[in-house]
Amino acid sequence: MQKAFEDNGRNLGYALLLKRYVDDPRQATPDQISKAAWDTVPGVAPMFWSFRIMVGLGFYFIAFMALMFILSARRMLDRYPILLRIAVLSIPLPWIAAEFGWVVAEFGRQPWMIEGMLPTAAGVSNLGASTVLMTICGFALIYTTLIIIEMGLMIGAIRKGPAPDTKPEAGLLEARLAPAE
Ligand code: HEM
C-alpha cells in the first residue's frame, strides 16, 4: 500500500515536471522526457563550491578553536595579538557558513519540494507577493527594533563597566600588583 502510494506520488511528480514541456505528459516525446529528466539534476558548480566553503569554514572553526584553547590554557594568548585580531575578524564566518549550508540544502533539493514527488513549481504558495512582502517587512521591523534595544543595553553596560569589587582581598591584590616605590 505504502509502495503503491509512493509510486503514484512519484509518477505524479515526474508528470508535473514534464508539463513544462508538454501539456499532456502521456504524449511526451523521448526528447521531452530527457529534457524533464535533466531538469532534476542540480547545477554542479554552486553545490560544489557552497559545500566546500561551508565544510572548509567548519574545519577552520575546529582548528582555530583548538589552537586558541591550547594557548589560553597555557596563558599564552597575549603573545600572539595577530590571533586575537583573526578571532575578531572571524566573527561573521559562522553566519557565512550557515548561509552556504542553506544554499547547499535548498539548491541541491531543486527542482523538488519533496524529492521525486512534489516539484517546486507545483508547491508554490498562492499567497500574493504583497502579502509575503508585508510579512517580511513585519519581521524586519521587529528584529530591527530588537537589535536597537539590545545594542543600546550592551553599550550602556559597557559604558558603566564592571561593578567595583567589594571583597577585602581585591584591595590586597591591587596593593600587591602596584609597582614598588
Ligand atoms: C564540518 C563540516 C560540515 C559538514 C560536513 C556539513 C555538512 C552539511 C550537509 C551535508 C548539509 C546538507 C544537508 C541536507 O541534506 O539538507 C548541510 C547543510 C547545512 N549546513 Fe553544514 N556542514 C558543515 C559545517 C557547517 C557549519 C560550520 C555551519 C554553520 C555555522 C553549517 C550550516 C549548515 C546549514 C544552516 C545547513 C542547511 C540546513 C537545512 O536548511 O536543512 N554547516 N551541512
Image (cartoon, helix red, strand yellow):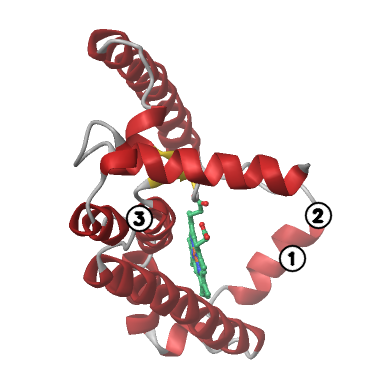
Q: Nearer the viewer, residue 66 or 112?
A: 112
Residue 80: x %, y % from top left? 40, 88
Residue under numbered circle 3: 103
Dot 3 or dot 2, earlier in sequence? 3
Give the residue displayed 34% in from the left and 40% down from the top: 26
Residue under numbered circle 1: 172
Mark 2 surroundings: few (<14), some (14-19) or many (≥20) residues within 10 A: few
Residue 148: x %, y % from top left? 37, 25
For badge 1, the amino acid type reads Leu
Q: Would you say 77 lies left or right of 167 here?
A: left
| Disc 2 + disc 1, Cβ < 8 Å | yes
Which circle, 3 or 2, is nearer the viewer? 3
Give the residue displayed 67% in from the left and 40% down from the top: 5
Residue 123: x %, y % from top left? 41, 29
Dot 1 or dot 3, earlier in sequence? 3
> Is residue 130 visible to us here?
yes
